[in-house]
Image (spheres, helix red, strand yellow):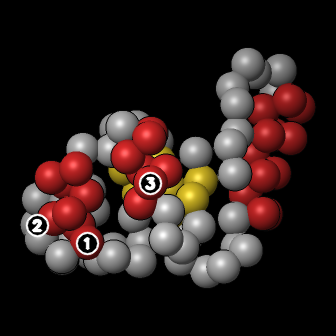
Amino acid sequence: MFGSHRSMHLAIAKGVNMRRLVAETLGGKTGTNKGKGGHMHWFDPIVNFWRVPIVGAVWPHAGAALAFKMKGKDNVAVV
């Protein structure tokens, strides 16, 4: 799942651990990216959630759906 700016609700819906999410937002070492992404660049490999901070920037990521189809996978891409 790919989220754009202000997508905390999507992270919660996807199942991102709230303690890790808040830690990442505040730059903490226990965050989803060890505090390196901060409040703008979230990625949680545990639940496969990506957040892109640029408005409208996730549309190219919808290409993941095409890639899944071309590879014959049953995966779903949500943007």
Would you say residue 34 is visible in this rendering? no
* 41 on left or right of 55: left
- In this figure, which residue is indicated by the disc labeled 2? 29
Residue at the spot 72% in from the left edge and 57% down from the top edge: 61
**Label 2 near label 1: C-beta < 8 Å?**
no
Count residues near mark 3 (Cα–Cα under 10 Å), then give few for <14, some for 14-19, many for 20+: few
At mark 2, the secondary structure is loop
Residue located beneath label 3 in the image:
9
Q: Does residue 33 lie above or below 48 as drawn?
A: below
Whether 41 is drawn above or below 69: the answer is: below
Which amino acid lies under the numbered mark 3 shown in the image of this protein?
His
The image shows residue 34 at horizontal and vertical percentages of: 19, 64
**Element assignment for label 3:** helix
User: Which element type, helix, strand or loop, lies under badge 1?
Assistant: helix
Q: Is residue 39 left or right of residue 70?
A: left
Q: Is residue 2 left or right of residue 27?
A: right
Residue at 79%, 40% (x, y): give it.
65
The three-letter code of the residue at mark 2 reads Lys
Q: CA distance from mark 1 to mark 2?
A: 10 Å
Label located before the other in sequence (2 or 3): 3
Comparing marks 1 and 2, which lies closer to the viewer?
A: 1
Q: Compare residues 63 and 40 and report the one nearer the observer.
A: 40
**Disc 1 and disc 3 in contact, CB within 8 angstroms:** no
Q: Nearer the viewer, residue 71 or 59?
A: 59
Q: Amino acid at mark 1?
A: Thr
